[in-house]
Image (cartoon, grey):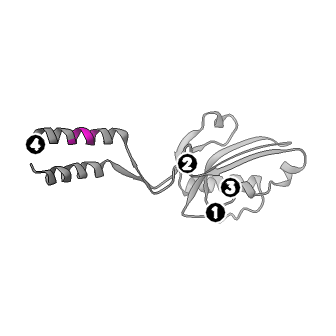
Amino acid sequence: MNSSKILFVIGIIALSCVTYTYAIRCYSCDTKKACKSPKKVECNNGLANTTRAYLDFHHTGINPNTTSPFIECMQERIKSNQGEFEYKGCVYSNINVCQLPLRDFHTSGRYERTCAKCNDKDLCNPAGRASISGFALIATVVMGLLVRKISA
């Protein structure tokens, strides 16, 4: 076997190890207790719509028809006279979660709020990026070494 064929075979094996991730994965929970061990979910429009409904309940200024082809992860914790609320999930990227004003029932007394929106850390992986499995990469290297040894 000549070197161009070996390189071709190694290239085909390497390409088969690359996968494309089209959806972002986020933590998901809707209560303080559930958020102690949140689920890991692959975001979709259904989950983003659920988050939009949550936001509409706790905040003003939400358009109930807002959608976007891009989805990000979000988390929010509200502590007010109404109780403690914690939420993690998928949100349409064009909803500015952390700038939304709280509804009056939260702000009528003392309250605390923390909020974050992300798409590039923890479970915030960017959508549409290629990723390579470590196992597949090792298998490719081993296959390349075996082909080289056999052809020598």
Q: Which mark is on residue 124?
A: 2
Amino acid type, label 2:
Cys
Give SS at disc 4: helix
Residue pointed to by mark 3: 53
Residues packed near mark 4 inside 10 Å, few (<14), some (14 to 19) or many (20 plus): few
| 3 and 4 marks in contact (CB < 8 Å) | no
Extent of the magenta region:
139-144
Residues packed near mark 1 inside 10 Å, few (<14), some (14 to 19) or many (20 plus): few
Q: Which tag, 3 or 4, sits closer to the chain's start? A: 3
Amino acid type, label 4:
Ser
> Which residue is pictured at 32% across the width and 42% down the height?
137
Residues packed near mark 2 inside 10 Å, few (<14), some (14 to 19) or many (20 plus): some
Q: Which tag, 3 or 2, sits closer to the chain's start? A: 3
Farthest-out residue, right: 109
> Which residue is pictured at 22% across the width and 48% down the height?
10
Overall secondary structure of the magenta stretch? Answer: helix
Amino acid type, label 3:
Ala
User: Does residue 63 sit above or below 17 in this rendering?
Assistant: below
| Left/right of residue 134 with respect to residue 144 in the rendered view | right
Viewport quadrant of the C terminus: top left
Disc nearest the viewer among 2 and 4: 4
Q: Which mark is on residue 151?
A: 4
Amino acid type, label 1:
Asn
- Alpha carbon distance from label 1 to label 2: 16 Å
Q: Quadrant of residue 34?
A: top right
Percent coordinates x, y for residue 119 in the rendering? 57, 52
Residue pointed to by mark 1: 94
| Left/right of residue 18 with respect to residue 56 in the rendered view | left
